[in-house]
Image (cartoon, rainbow, N blue to C red):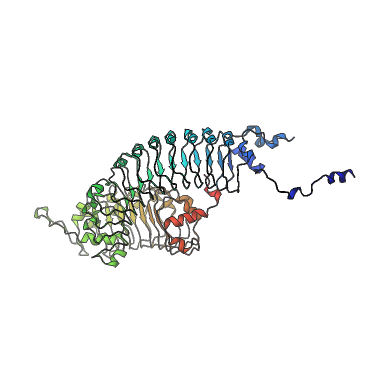
């Protein structure tokens, strides 16, 4: 009977009564965190951080109160302080001052929550190196945060920030600062004290000018000021000696900035109000390799465009250009010229659709060669094909051209004519070649551009990998299905064109060439690719996989944030839908990122 009396005292409805419950973390997770020093609570629908998380380093674990024996792996008294806490993709609206109890944290990820403010206690986490606060509702940054001397990475994009504390310059070890997608109208002058900074993202704000303090950032390699209200770029940016990539898209610029930054390789100034290119600006960009000027109001190209001798990609899409100067064809490294959406006259439409090489060849043919002096002796010779050797091109342009001859081999006379010349460009396209001429090795120390498209090549011999100066290879419209592993030795290679071949997978060796900026693999049979390896190509900006056999697009491809041009049309995948693909690269990458499981986003 006593048993039933005890039962009478039990509240049988207790499990149904509403009441506030303290959010908890499974003991197994806490136990693992004490061993590893890492705790992942991302995507758990948390409204607040459980107290047992804050007290993880100081509270005695539950198993310590149990009368059990401990194995070597279960010695709770040998626990590790928590160093990495991941709380992203929850519903946190605030962070308790108790965060100070986790003094050993080096990484704190709070992105994708609903935080509108931060506690000053964050400033006590002096070991912190990475702080991720993007995709919240922050309107301000506590000044205490600026005391984190060891902080390396601070991401604040997609918040509601209208200003920043003047003490921001105290973060003297910061290497990456992302302030994009906020409401900033100005930047503190103390920004110039962040002398370790390498990446600075300021896009999608309301900046009308850039502070002079930026000129003090001698180590910044990437500066993104796109989608602001800039009307001018201070010439002082030339003092940013390490600057390699400058993004100025979607602003109100009327002139191309005049920058003498010695390391600048890529300048993106599309979607502005630029009407003309002046020689002074062009003269300051002699080392530029990528120049994007699409969606402006440019009417003419000056002959001084030849000053950009290192240019490999020139995007002039959607401007008001009516004519092209013949001098454009003299740019020795130009391999991609985009002109769609211009009212060009005097150039047939079908010529424009044949691609850059054909267009440049056409312009080159319009150049009137100066008559040769009599005392120079013969500068041409007749080959068996009755084709004339253009010694002028060999000597002045360093160009060895034997294209469109329908030849199954390259005559030795051509190589003999180029002996002792530092040939940089070879064009043997549109022939019947079934092998790559071995005599190309004679230009081993100088050859940077090789064009072998529209031939009958079935393999790419390892010998081509001895041409260590190569920056561009064009092998389109052949019968290739593989590339030699030795290709990874080409550490200067920036662009490779493999369109219209027989590749059934993404060539593995390309994942090893970290210098690559452009990979064109359209019109093959590629069935898949590995985004985790693709992300290692930190310079890759253009990837063409159109008209292949891709049945699905890995969401992780969205993490390849260096991509500026991604072509996927003409594949049999169902997602992303054609409507999303049609919106362009940024829309596709954003869609893919949205489909990545939260755990895959964690560092």
Q: Nearer the viewer, residue 171 or 375?
A: 171
What number of labels is visible? 0
Position of residue 599 in the picture relative to residue 163 (left or right) = right
Q: Residue furthest left?
A: 374
- Residue shown at 40%/51% (left/top)? 540
Position of residue 159 in the picture relative to residue 262 (left or right) = right
Taking the image as drawn, is residue 410 in sight? no
Task: Locate the N terminus by quadrant.
Answer: top right
Q: Position of residue 128 (x, y in %)?
A: 51, 36
Q: Position of residue 399 (x, y in %)?
A: 24, 54
Q: Residue furthest right?
A: 1
Q: Nearer the viewer, residue 502 or 583?
A: 583
**Placement of 99 over or under 410, stated as above or below:** above
Which image quadrant for residue 27? Answer: top right
Which image quadrant for residue 235? Answer: top left
Q: Position of residue 455 (x, y in %)?
A: 33, 63
**Placement of 511 over or under 388, stated as above or below:** above
**Placement of 58 over or under 461, stated as above or below:** above
**Placement of 101 over or under 441, stated as above or below:** above
Which image quadrant for residue 38? Answer: top right
Position of residue 393 in the picture relative to residue 85 (left or right) = left
């Amino acid at each position: 009977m006593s048993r039933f009396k005890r039962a009478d005292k039990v509240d049988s409805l207790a499990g149904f009564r509403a009441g506030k419950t303290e959010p908890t973390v499974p003991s197994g997770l806490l136990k693992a965190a004490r061993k590893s020093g890492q705790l992942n609570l991302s995507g758990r629908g948390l409204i607040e951080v459980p107290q047992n998380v804050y007290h993880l380093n100081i509270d005695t674990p539950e198993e310590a109160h149990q009368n059990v024996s401990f194995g070597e792996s279960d010695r709770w008294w040998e626990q590790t302080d928590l160093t990495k806490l991941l709380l992203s993709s929850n519903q946190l609206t605030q962070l308790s001052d108790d965060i100070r109890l986790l003094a050993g944290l080096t990484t704190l990820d709070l992105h994708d929550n609903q935080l509108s403010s931060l506690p000053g206690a964050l400033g006590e986490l002096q070991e912190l190196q990475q702080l991720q606060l993007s995709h919240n509702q922050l309107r301000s940054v506590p000044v205490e945060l600026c005391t984190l001397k060891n902080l390396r990475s601070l991401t604040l994009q997609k918040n509601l920030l209208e200003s920043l504390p003047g003490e921001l310059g105290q973060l003297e070890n910061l290497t990456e600062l992302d302030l994009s997608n906020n409401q900033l109208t100005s930047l503190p002058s103390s920004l110039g004290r962040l002398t370790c900074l390498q990446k600075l993202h300021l896009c999608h704000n309301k900046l009308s000018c850039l502070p002079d303090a930026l000129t003090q950032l001698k180590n910044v390699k990437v500066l993104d000021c796109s989608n602001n209200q800039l009307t001018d770029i201070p010439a002082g940016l030339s003092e940013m000696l390490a600057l390699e990539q400058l993004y100025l898209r979607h602003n109100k610029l009327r002139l191309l900035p005049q920058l003498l930054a010695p390391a600048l390789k890529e300048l993106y100034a599309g979607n502005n109000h630029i009407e003309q290119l002046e020689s002074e600006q062009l003269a300051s960009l002699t080392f530029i390799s990528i120049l994007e000027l699409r969606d402006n109001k440019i009417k003419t190209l000056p002959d001084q465009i030849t000053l950009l001798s290192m240019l490999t990609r020139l995007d002039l899409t959607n401007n008001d250009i009516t004519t092209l100067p013949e001098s454009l064809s003299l740019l020795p490294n130009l391999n991609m010229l985009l002109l769609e959406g211009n009212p060009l006259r005097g150039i047939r439409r079908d010529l424009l659709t044949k691609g850059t090489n054909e267009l440049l060849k056409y312009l080159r043919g319009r150049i009137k060669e100066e008559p040769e002096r009599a005392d120079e002796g013969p500068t041409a010779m007749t080959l068996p094909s009755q084709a004339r050797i253009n010694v002028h091109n060999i000597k002045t342009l360093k160009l060895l051209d034997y294209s469109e001859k329908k030849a199954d081999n390259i005559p030795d006379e051509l190589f003999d004519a180029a002996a002792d010349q530092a040939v940089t460009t070879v064009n043997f396209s549109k022939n019947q070649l079934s092998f790559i001429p071995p005599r190309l090795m004679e230009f081993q120390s100088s050859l940077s551009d090789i064009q072998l498209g529209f031939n009958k090549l079935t393999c790419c011999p390892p010998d081509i990998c001895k041409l260590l100066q190569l920056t561009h290879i064009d092998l389109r419209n052949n019968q290739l299905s593989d590339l030699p592993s030795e290709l990874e030795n080409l550490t200067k290679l920036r662009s490779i064109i493999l369109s219209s071949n027989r590749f059934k997978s993404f060539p593995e060796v390309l994942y090893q060439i970290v210098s690559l900026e452009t990979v064109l693999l359209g019109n093959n049979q590629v069935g898949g690719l590995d985004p985790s390896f693709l992300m290692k190509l930190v310079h890759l900006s253009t990837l063409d996989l159109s008209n292949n056999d891709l049945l699905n697009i890995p969401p992780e491809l969205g993490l390849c944030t260096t991509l500026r041009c991604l072509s996927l049309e003409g594949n049999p995948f169902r997602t992303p839908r054609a409507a999303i693909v049609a919106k362009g690269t940024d829309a596709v990458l954003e869609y893919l990122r949205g489909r990545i499981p939260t755990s895959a986003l964690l560092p």
